[in-house]
Structure formats: structure tokens, C-alpha cells
Image (spheres, rainbow, N blue to C red):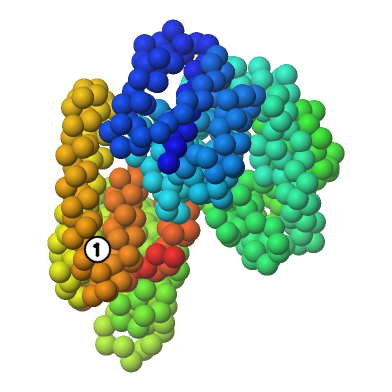
Amino acid sequence: MTVGIYIRVSTEEQVQEGYSISAQRERLKAFCIAQNWNEHKFYVDEGISGRSTNRPQFKKLMKDVEAGHIKVLLVYRLDRLTRSVRDLHKILDHLEKYDCVFRSATEIYDTSTAMGRMFITIVAAIAEWESANLGERVRMGQIEKAHQKEWAALAPYGFYKDDKHKLHQHKEEIEAVKLMVQKVREGFSFRQLSIYMDSTKYKPRRGYKWHIRTLMDLMHNPALYGAMRWRDEIVEDTHKGIMSKEEFEQFQKIIESRQNYKKRNVNSVFIYQMKIVCPDCRNRCSSERSVWKRKKDDQQVEKNAYRCQVCALNKNYSTPAFRIREADIDEALIIYMNDLLLEPSSTRIMKDTNPGDELIAEMKRIENQREKYQRAWASDLITDDEFKNRMNESRIRYVELKAELEKLKGVRYDEKDIEKDKENAKLFKDNFTALTPEEKRSFVQTFIEGIEIEIVERTKAKGFRNQKIKVADVHFY
Ligand SMILES: [Zn+2]
């Protein structure tokens, strides 16, 4: 098995410590040895920025991947590969197609699962967003770029960027945008439009459903008439739009006139929409805003909550309908995921005890330990030699355990599912807390089919105060 090691440095980076080609080369070689990867091949692009698509060695590497010569693509850090989310998507898809795994020596990503790919994309998106928001100096740069009709941010849906950061209409996406505009003109609300778009062949860039927020942003974007908005500045004639400026202004008036209700609160992102299973009747809970006056300062407070409408309508029901705050689900979910990972004898596995459980648990512990070594090594806390030794020792033990597990095969229940859940749980714990509500929502909606809640202590009053709940089970797609 050959590992393709990709190294890239920009001209500015070459003078920085630790980034030089030889430094990356040495560390990556050490990493391969520690992983017991015997064959490796270097592909080095020197003096090339992360945004450039003209990377001859990278192209060569991809050719070798396509030919089936390379089974692992290793980089020192994700940003060596690309700084563009769109590119990253493309690259990961491509690698998967040719059965090649992506690894970063200093970051833990597992692209062999859908969840891992999701996180890596989020990490890249955040990095890209941060680098686009590095303060006034950068802002000036962005406006400067806009004046040169270059698009610094992600291309909006309907468009793509070329090498020179110019926007062009994306053949299929622009058809979708034109259809949206037509439907809004015909009188569709954004809610109706989202349902309608879901029924068409057009899919959003991420996820599988059109969200109202996305559609609103799209329909308000001056990109529609060939202009670029950066914060509150607009630069016109940056690319070819699909309507004139007058038409765009008219279009905005149409949209505004329909929004007779108060502006949507940004916080009304329901993370667990249609995912919470009612513990009493097993129907899915509806999302709601719970609004109350806080006693201490008489301020109005709003929180997201979920309530079972089926139980609420059932008047014979002796207890109040099940209701839960979003924050309580967040908390319970993290506890559940942690337990799933850290407690090998959790209730879920206890259901079916198996002699392989302990072996699996120990293997998992070793895997975790190996990740810790990798982190320590990446942060220069241990030397290359120490790293090699520790990785070697742990691998020997791991191989022994695996052999024992093989012997037990045949009597095993669906261990693969549990392993998959555990892996997901770990990624979840590491990443979920860092996400914004929108990202959490997109994550939950994409990967979780349903969340089962168990009432530990039922509240007698209407409020949530004395209710104690826990997450009983999570079903992943
Ligand atoms: Zn119910």
C-alpha cells in the first residue's frame, strides 16, 4: 500500500519555522513509520498558495490515485490540501470514488464515515469564514477585490468562481435560481417555495432540503443582478446577473410587501425539528417558541422548545403533554453520546452481552490512546522517536486483540453497528459543542433520524422546572 504525501508551501510560508518543505517532509516520514506504512511517495508543490488551482504535483497525485496506486493521501494539515470548502468537497468525493483515504498528520479526521466528512467540511467552512473575517485590513482587501470585480467569499448558489475569482453562472444552479424567482413572483411564500423546491430535481449545495433561510438569503442577494455585496457595500457590474437592477429592486418590494409579520428572529433555528420522539405516544414533537416574562427584571425571554401535539390534543390524557426545552436536549444528548463512547458496558451493549465486548472496548481505548499520541506529537510534546515507539507498542497489542476477536467471530451480534455508533459518538462529543445553532441544525438534520427521550422525573406543573429527562437512544441515518 502506497501513501501519497502531499506537501505544499506558499512563498511567504517558506520562511516560517516548521513550514519549510524539509520540516514537513521529515515529520510526515516519521508519521508514516509510526503508522507502519512502509511505502510512501512525495508530491511537493513549492511556492504555491492554498487558493491556487495550478498545482502540478497535486494533479499528478490525483492521477496516481485514479490509477489505484495511492490508497492513503497524507498531509501535514488540512490547509495544505486546500482552503476552499468547495474544492475540499470535490477532493474528498473523488478520493472516495477511488477508494483512497484522507489523513492529516496533525488533525484527527476520519473520512471513511459520512459524519467524519461532514465535520471536516465544517472545520474547513469555519476556517474559510475566519480567514474572510480577519478584521478591517482584510475587509479593505475584500472591498478592493470587489472593485476589481473579484469575488472573495464563497460563490453564492447559482454561480461559481473561476481561477481569477470572477463569478460565472452555474448552468444547473442558475436554472434553479430562475425558477425560485419565478415562483416568488407568482406569489409563493418562502415556506411554500421551500416545499416546492424540495419536489424538484434541484438540490441545495449542502444537505438535502431547501431551508427557508437559504432561500431568503438567495432572493435578497444583489448577485441576482450582477452586483456584489460585502457587508454594507455594494459593487455593481461584477458579473452577469439574471435581471436588471430595476427588476431586482422591484423584486425586493414584492418580497417585502408579503412580509407583513414581524421580522424572523435569527434564533428561531430549530435544531431538533421533527427529530424528538414523544416518550408517551412515540409521535414526533413539534417545534415551538416558549416565551415568558422573567421575574427578576421583567424581561421577555424566548427559548426554543418541542411539544407533542398529539398528546396535547388528547384530552383524556391525565398528565400534561410532553414538552422539552432545546437546551435540555443539547445537554442530554452530549451526556448520552459521551456515555456511549466512554462506557463500553452501557445499557445498549448490556442488552446483548458478548465475550467480544471487552476486547472491542480495549481496542477502542487503544485507538483513543493512539490519537492522544498523535496529538502530543503534533504539538511537539513528544519526539519523533517516542512517537514511533508508542505507536509500535500499541499496535502490537491492538493486533493481538484483533486476533482474539477474530476467533470469537460467528457468535457475535451486530457489533458493526455498535462500533459505528461509538465512532460517531466520539466525533460528536469533540465537535458538537463548538457549532453554532445553524450548524447544529444542519448536522442533526443530516445525520440523525430520531432521538428517543426518557422521562426520569415527570413534572406535575406546566413548566419544565422539575422535569428530568435523558436521551434513551439516538438513531443515525
Ligand atoms: Zn405524545
Identity of the amino acid at label 1?
Glu
Query: Where is residue 460, by image quadrant?
Result: bottom left
Residue 190 in sight from this viewpoint: no
**On-image quarter of the C terminus:** bottom left
Farthest-out residue, bottom: 316
Q: Please say whether residue 5 is visible from this viewpoint.
A: yes
Measured from the top left, where is residue 444 in percent x and y? 42, 58
Is 98 left, or right, of 430 in this rendering?
Answer: right
Indicate the quadrant where residue 144 lies.
top right
In this view, 192 is above or below 27: below
Residue at the image point whose x is 71% and y is 19% from the top: 147
437 and 75: which one is in front? 75
Q: Position of residue 116 (x, y in %)?
A: 41, 49
Q: 45 and 191: which one is in front?
A: 45
- Percent across and percent down for residue 391 are 22, 37
Which residue is painted at 67% across and 44% down in the image?
157
**Residue named by callout 1:** 406
Helix or strand or loop: what does disc 1 sit on?
helix
* Label 1 crowd bin: few (<14), some (14–19), many (20+), radius 10 Å: few
Relative to 417, is 229 on the left or the right?
right
> Is residue 354 left or right of 266 when viewed as pictured?
left
Q: Is residue 401 left or right of residue 46?
A: left
Please name whichever residue, 328 or 21, is drawn nearer the observer in this view of the structure: 21
Residue at x 81%, y 35% (from the top left corner): 240
